[in-house]
Structure formats: C-alpha cells, structure tokens
Image (cartoon, grey):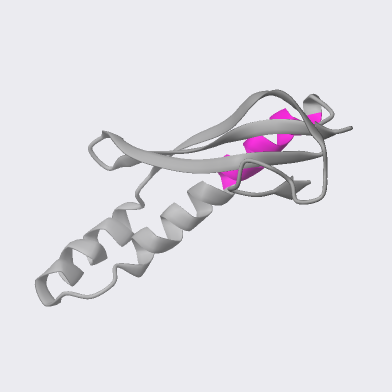
Amino acid sequence: MLLVNINYVPGKEIEALGLVKGTVVQSKNFGKDFMAGMKTLVGGEITGYTEMLNEARQIAVKRMVDEAEALNADAVINIRYGSSSVMQGAAEVIAYGTAVKYR
C-alpha cells in the first residue's frame, strides 16, 4: 500500500474511494511516567514518551491501512496525523487520508 502526504500519486490517474482513518488511545506506563517526571527536573528528551507516541502512530497507520485495504484501495493520499490528550495520562493519535484506486 502506497502512503503519501500529497494529494496525488505521481504518474497515476486515481479515483477517490473515501476517507480512511485509524485511531488509538495510548496510556502512559506508570514507571516511565515517574521517570519522565524526574527528567523534567534536568531537561532533555523524554524517550519513554517518544517511544509511546511512535508506537501509537504505527498502530494508527496500521488501522488506517486496514480500512483502505477493506475498500480495495491501491494507495492512501494526503495523509495527516493528529493527537490530543483525552484524559490525564492518555493521548489519542489519529492517522487519516483519502483511499484511492488506480484507473
């Protein structure tokens, strides 16, 4: 499955099949959360959170691709990501785009 964040597929004529998306709500690990709190005292990257968000993006993309495959899409174009805090200690990540079929 081709995934691009532009609104066309170079060299292909396409037909839009519809919006596809994948979401996940990921919670923080208590141990990592405690260490992240300690890290804020000295500054720098909080790698536990970086890893958590990378994993959440991968899950969201997989779910988006699953929706596109259910439509027999060849690609997903104009992909975007979003995130938000849904409660204390949990973040939602969404990946969405337009499923397309080559003509």
52 left or right of 67?
left
The residue that appears at 43% across and 53% down in the rendered structure is 53
The quarter of the picture where residue 78 lies is: top right
Where is residue 30? Give x, y as percent: 30, 53
Which SS type dominates the magenta stretch? helix
Is residue 60 highlighted in magenta?
Answer: yes
Q: Quick check: 6 above or below 66?
A: below
Q: Which residue occupies 15% across, 67% down? A: 40
Q: Position of residue 7 (x, y in %)?
A: 62, 41
Residue range highlighted in magenta: 59-69
Percent across and percent down for residue 4 are 65, 49
Q: Is residue 48 left or right of residue 6?
A: left
Q: Is residue 62 magenta?
A: yes
Q: Quadrant of residue 86?
A: top left
Q: Quadrant of residue 64?
A: top right
Q: Quick one: 34 or 48, which is closer to the camera?
A: 48
Q: Nearer the viewer, residue 40 or 9?
A: 9
Q: Residue at x 35, y 59 (%)?
A: 49
* Quadrant of image for the C terminus: top right
Q: Tell me residue 101's x, y (percent).
A: 82, 32
Task: Please state if 22 lies on the left or on the right of 102 as rendered.
Answer: left
Q: Residue at x 16, y 74 (%)?
A: 43
